[in-house]
Image (tube, rainbow, N blue to C red):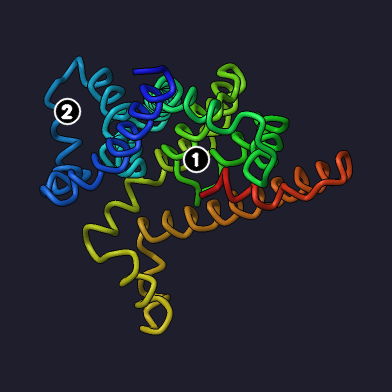
Amino acid sequence: MDKMKKDKIKTIAFVLIAIGLPLLAYFTGMDKYMTRDKIRHFVESYETLAPIVYIVGMTLLPIIGAPRLILTAVGGALFGLLWGTVFAMIGSTTAGVLGYYLAYYSTADYFEASTANKHNKLMSMLDFTKRNNFWLIFLARICPITHYEAINYICGTSKIPFGSFFWSTFFGIIPGTFVYVMMGDAIMEISDKKGILNLISDMTVGGKFNELIVDKDVKMLIWVIILLAIFLVGTLTGFYYIIKGEKKETGATPAPMAENQITN
C-alpha cells in the first residue's frame, strides 16, 4: 500500500473517531455522567491527586464531548479562583496540544498531498490563515462562539507552525478561562435550579426581573453575558480589521471565507 493510501485511511479513521466519540457518548448515555456534580465528586475523591486528575480530565474529556464550561466551572468550585484558573489553563493548553498533534499525525500529510498545486478558494483561505495564524487563532480562542476542538484539528491538519499555535492558544484562553472559573459555578447553579432559558423568560416576559436580580447567581450570570458579549464584539472587530488589512496588502478577497474557516 503506497503512502498516499495509508494517509487517506488515517485521515478517514481520524474523522470517524473525532465525530464518532461524542456521538457514542451521547447515544450510550455517557453524557449523563458529565454533569458538574458527578465530575466534581469524582475529582474530589482523589484528594491530594485531585489537581492532576482534574488536568487529565480537562485534557481528555472534551474529545468525547464534555462541555468545557462545566469542566472549567468544576475547577473554580474545587480549587478557587487562582488555582482553578491555573489548573484549567494547563488542562486547556494540553488539550489543545493533544488535538493539534492528533490531527497533525493523522490528516496533515494527506491534506497537504491532496491539495498540492491547487489554486482555489480553499487554498486561498488556507494561505490567508497561515499568513495571519497567530492573531486568527488568538481571537478565535477568545471568541465565545468558536469550537475549541475544531480549531485544534484545523490547525494540526493545515500544519500551522506549532509555536504560533501554542502561544496563541495559551494567551487566547486566558480571558475565557478566568471568566468561566470565576462565574461558571454560578451558571451551573442556575442551570440546576431553574434553567438559564427559563430564567431569561421569567426576567423578561414573566415580569420577575426585580425579584430575580437580587439573587447572587443571577448577578453573576448577567456579568457573564456582558463579558461574553464584549468578547464577541471585540473578536469580530479583530477579525474584521485583519481581513481589511489583508485586502489592502494583497488586493485579494479570500478573507471572509477564512474567517468562517476559523470560527466554525
In the rendered view, would you say 239 is above or below 87?
A: below
Is disc 2 surrounded by few (<14), some (14 to 19) or many (20+) residues within 10 Å? Answer: some
Q: Residue at x 32, y 37 (%)?
A: 18
In this view, the residue in front, 8 or 38, is: 8
Residue 249, compared with residue 46, is above or below; it is below
Which numbered disc covers residue 248? none
Q: Secondary structure at mark 2?
A: helix
Viewer-nearest residue: 119 or 84: 119
- Please state the horizontal and vertical placement of residue 66, each as a whole percent of the image: 27, 41
Q: Nearer the viewer, residue 235 or 8?
A: 8
**Pointer 1 with pointer 2, Cβ within 8 A:** no
Q: Earlier in the sequence, mark 1 or mark 2?
A: 2
Marks 1 and 2, how far apart at CA: 24 Å
Residue sitting at 31 percent across and 28 percent down? 79
Residue situated in front as seen by the camera: 136 or 123: 123
Q: Is residue 200 toward the left or the right of residue 56 in the image? A: right
Q: Secondary structure at mark 1?
A: helix
Neighbours of disc 1 within 10 Å: few (<14), some (14-19), many (20+): many
Q: Residue at x 49, y 27 (%)?
A: 156
In the rendering, at what x and y percent does residue 142 appear?
A: 56, 41
As shown in the figure, which amino acid type bears the numbered disc 1?
A: Gly
On the picture, is 66 further left or further right than 85? Answer: left
Amino acid under disc 2: Glu
Tell me residue 82's x, y (percent). 42, 27
Residue 146 place in picture, x, y as percent: 50, 47
Residue tagged 2: 44
Residue drawn at 25 percent across, 38 percent down: 64
Left or right: 215 in relation to 241:
left
Which residue position holds label 1? Answer: 176
Give the foreground label among 1 and 2: 1
